[in-house]
Amino acid sequence: PMTHDLMSDLVAGLGGRLEALHIHDLRNGTYYGLLQLRVEGREEPLLVDARPSDGMALALRTGAEIRISRKVLDDIPDFDFLAPEAGDQVVSALGLTLVTPSEALRRELSLPDRPGLVVRSAVGAAARLGLRRGDFVVAVDGIVAATPMEFLDAVRAAPFAAPVAVTYWRDGEEATVELLPEPPARRPGERPARIV
């Protein structure tokens, strides 16, 4: 992510502005994109070849539009999504990054023998409310989540813009905090990205 921040700062520092990302083609399973930059002193926008994933990261940081051609939307391939096995899953939501505890991790953290997930990191409101690495999340809005994907499903099932109750275990005691989904942080003056 720091590389995308650097790219955004470079464009702005050189007097440019990212106006849009165009995801314009899909060939042999590869997406193609162009960054549309407005550069001081040029009448026409500058188009720069870019991987769509990098372009989206920049667009989200700068508030640029994301434009997807009808051809790409019509050619999206069909595929069956297979989630990784529970032991390999990692999810981030509500400012928490969670993993399934291995037996070794359960022993190391003296975790109870019950379903739950280990907090790998906590940021934003989750950290401010006291959640930290090593906490054992045992429920989301009263739903027991035994895998990271179950946690994510429970968060998604919560009413939009409503607080989500996260119950966690630490040192033999349970506590519950209410967390609101947080939008990605933007720098002052940045607009939210729009998909058009």
Image (cartoon, helix red, strand yellow):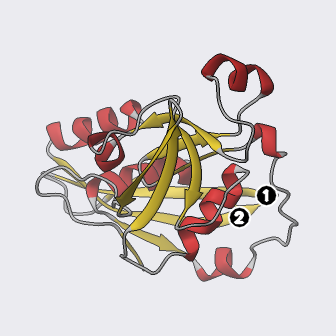
Mark 2, residue position: 26
Residue 38 picture quarter: bottom left
Give the camera-side residue of 112 and 17. Answer: 112
- Left or right: 14 in relation to 102: left
* Res. 129 visible in picture: yes
Mark 2 closeness class: few <14, some 14–19, many ≥20 residues within 10 Å: some
Task: Give, as a three-letter code, the residue at label 1.
Answer: Gly
Q: Quadrant of the C terminus?
A: bottom left
Residue at (79% x, 26% y) in the render? 103
| Residue 106 place in picture, x, y as percent | 70, 26
Q: Which mark is residue 171?
A: none
**Amino acid marked by disc 2:** Leu
> How far across and how far down the image is residue 44, in percent?
26, 63
| Element under disc 2 | strand
Estimate the spatial distance between the alpha carbons at disc 1 and disc 2, rounded to whole Å.
6 Å
| Residue linked to disc 1 | 29
Quick check: 109 above or below 79?
above
Q: Which percent across, then down, holds residue 163?
A: 37, 69
Compared with residue 46, is residue 65 higher up or lower down, i.e. above or below? below
Tell whether label 2 touches label 1 (CB within 8 Å).
yes
